[in-house]
Image (tube, rainbow, N blue to C red):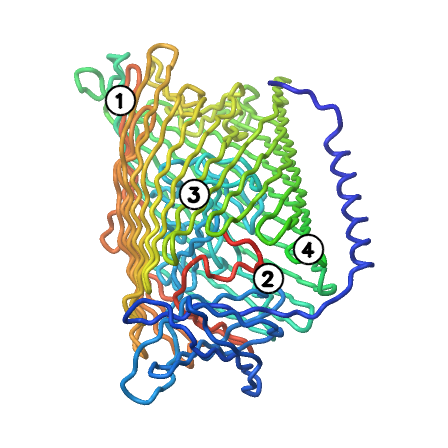
Amino acid sequence: MQIKRKMNLKTMLIYIVLFFLVFFLYTNLYSQPRTIKGIISGKVIDKSADLPLESATIQVINIIGDEFVNGGASDSRGEFRITNIPAGTYNIKISYIGYNTSILKGIIVNRSNTNVNIGNIVMELSSEVTEEIEVTTEAPVMKMEFEKKVYELKQSIVSESGSAIDVLKNVPSVTVDNDGNISIRGSESIKIFIDGKPSGLFGSDNTTILEQIPSNSIEKIEIINNPSAKYEAEGMAGILNIILKKNVDLIGYNGSISVNAGTEDKYNTTLGISLRKDNFGISANYSFRSFRMPGTGDGLRTNFFSDSLRTLYQFEEHNRKMQSHFASLGFDYDINDRNNLNLGLNINFRNRKRSEYTDYDYFNVNNILVQNLDNRSSENDDGFNIEGTLSHQLKFNEKNRLLTTSLNYSLNNSDEIIDRSKQKYNTSGNPSENPLLSKDLFDEKYKFATFQSDYTHPLNGNSKFETGIKFNYQNINITSDYQNFDYNSLSWISDILKNDDYKYNQYIGAAYGSYAIKIKDFGIQAGLRMEYTNTDFTLSNTSDYYKNDYIDFFPSLNLTQKIGNSNELGLNYSRRINRPRARFLNPFVDYSDPLNLRSGNPELQPEYINAFELNYIKYFSSTSITSSVFFRNATDVINRFRRIDSSGISITTFENIARANSYGVELILQSAFTKWWNNMASFSYFSTDLKGNDGIQEITNSSSSWTGKIMSNIALPDIVNIQLAYNYFGKRVMLQGSIEPLHSLDIAFRKDFFNKRLSISLNIRDVLKTMKFEIETNGTGFTSSFNHNRNSRIVFLTLTYKFGTEMKEKKKFKKPDEENNNNMENDIDF
């Protein structure tokens, strides 16, 4: 359904911004400050009987002056709730006659942590006089929160010297292949956010950008497999949210500096510092990253349409080097106890150089060499990105009633030059003609703006209503100049037929509403999201113009049921969309590889997905098991489609030629066997059935695959911390072929000094050197295979020093739903 715009979206956006500015001024002038009072809660359990412990004594003690602030006792269910706790840092003392006393240190109550749940405190019988013990078990690596999984990087040693790509390799549900392509549960259709927002950092190549974000700049990764109506509907497999470090909530100042070096010319330096005093906080981070990555590849292709050029064998060598500067600056200001203002700025400068040599050998049907050529290229890419975010949060007098508003703008520019040389040889190995010299000059500009406002209104103690609006504007302008060297005039001449100049605009306006209610242990959240999409695509060289606009509705439903104190059951549904990217639409033919051409399709339509998921979580005293069953039905699936002509040249494009059903199961197990050893294991099995038509024949393909990950953390007191991470990725199916399995093993060691302020780490990636990319493709009249090998075995040495007046303390292993979600008192817990 196509609906024409009746109002200019830019004008509408201006009106909305003016409205919220006036609203912000009004609420700021008439707001009344109030003193922050927090709540500390938890549950006391007998270790041997695994039962609640009633009448345990809880004391809240301020670390300044060791002053007693408040206290209480656990009830018949072992639960306690200590109220009226002023902002500050506390030690929590839990005691009971005949049991060892437990002390949890460094519990922080502040503006963003008003409701702190310290989870299950396991008490152990003592045959002697009670003595105090400090609870020091590490928090779980993966936390399960409502709608999302949260992967914490505090314990990750194996990825601390790498990039965002290296972090994602160890995240459950996420798969990263040898070329850095990211998928969730077998699908590469995901939406990537930074700090909860779409980012202009991500232009046409997400992998390149993610490789330039240092892992030391990342605080955590959030995975939302089946988002509710509150979130954007984009992405078949859900949303991947990268949260960068800020630390503006810590009182005083703190920071860290980290330097590391790796084999084959790899270096990384990161510096971060934050300061908070009274109602003002500031944070700053800077990273420099320099990486060189050599690799090789080989391929074999058979063309059954040609006898003279039946078989093509190719071999390639490449060397890539990237350098980037990444900086972020954040300001946080509490105007009063009801209004908070936050300003964030991210800046990235990058340079990428790549050289590549490819040798092609053609054989006829009798396997006799008939043609040989080599292709050499060198690439230099300079770019920068600037991104700014301004957000405001208003807390009303009524608890849990919130209004948040944010405005985001980002600019991403890139200038690229590619020089190429193609030399033909006769069967004797001598050049048959002068080499063909060409070069491409690219100028790419990406602009992205987002306005968002969300409102939460509690209806009573057990229900709430949420609504909001969001406007996205994306502008892409790419110009390329393809030039050939003319030997007669000894000059470069532009090839007008191969020059690309296009402009792409995308407007998305969205509004949503959702209602949530909790009845005893049963919770339900239902929502509906409306999105209006308007896209236009212009080819300047040909004056071709493509336009598409449509309105879609995306319902969502989440059901949860707690069964006792240690079981949770969840069922959710959402409708999703996957819009074609700009490069998928661009009909310009890419001649970078003369025998393997690539082109987009301006007639592509979005694909639609219905996603279902059933979850079950079981908690034990020191172990949690999360299991999921999921099903996705997709229509008008966008697939890469490859054809080969009679001259042996292949062209790859994109088509809506398939329907797909994907289903599978996922298991995540986390366990802390002792205070010094914890483990996380995940297993994901998924199956995909594809059906389509290429215009000549029906195409069907189906396959099953699985991924497995194991991460083990061993902390030997006063000796060393050891971490092992093993990843296995099973065979993956495409409409015209498959990608072979691959696996890797990483090992890391870390030694701490000076009360953990100084640490030295040794990290060995892909110890067994097994990360090899192999793909097989087949279609009408051809078969092909290609292998790609990067030098993936890398050794890093990292030195990190932490400084400041406030250091984060370790927390006890706790039930993920009991983690502090920064919610206000009496918030509805699903």
- Marks 2 and 1: which is nearer the front? 2
Q: Are marks 3 and 1 in contact (CB under 8 Å)?
A: no
The residue identified by callout 3 is 354
What residue type is disc 2 on? Glu
Residue 626 position, x and y percent, is 35, 50
Q: Secondary structure at mark 3?
A: strand
Between residue 516 and residue 287, name the one nearer to us.
Answer: 516
Query: x%, y% of residue 438?
Result: 48, 29
Which residue is situated farthest in the bottom direction here? 129
Q: Is residue 140 left or right of residue 608?
A: left
Q: Compared with residue 708, is residue 253 higher up or lower down, i.e. above or below? A: below
Judge whether 84 appears above or below 565 on screen: below
Q: CA distance from mark 1 to mark 4?
A: 57 Å
For discs 4 and 3, the disc positioned in front in the rendered view: 4
- Counting residues from the N terminus, which is met first, the one under dot 2 or under dot 4? 4
Crowd band around label 3 with a 10 angstrom C-alpha radius: few (<14), some (14–19), many (20+): some
Q: In the rendered structure, find residue 393 and report the number of the disc placed on it.
A: 4
In terms of sequence position, does the residue under pointer 4 or pointer 3 come before the other? 3
Judged left or right of residue 397, residue 80 is left
| Rendering coords of residue 641 (x, y %) | 39, 22
Q: Real-space Cα distance between discs 2 and 1?
A: 62 Å
Residue identified by numbered label 2: 825
Question: Secondary structure under badge 2?
Answer: loop
- Mark sitting on residue 783: 1
Disc 2 to disc 3, C-alpha distance: 54 Å
Q: Residue at x 52, y 36 (%)?
A: 556
Query: Height in image: 595 above or below 268?
Result: above
Which quadrant of the structure image shows residue 539? top right
Quarter of the figure with residue 364? top left
Q: Name which residue type carries label 3.
A: Arg
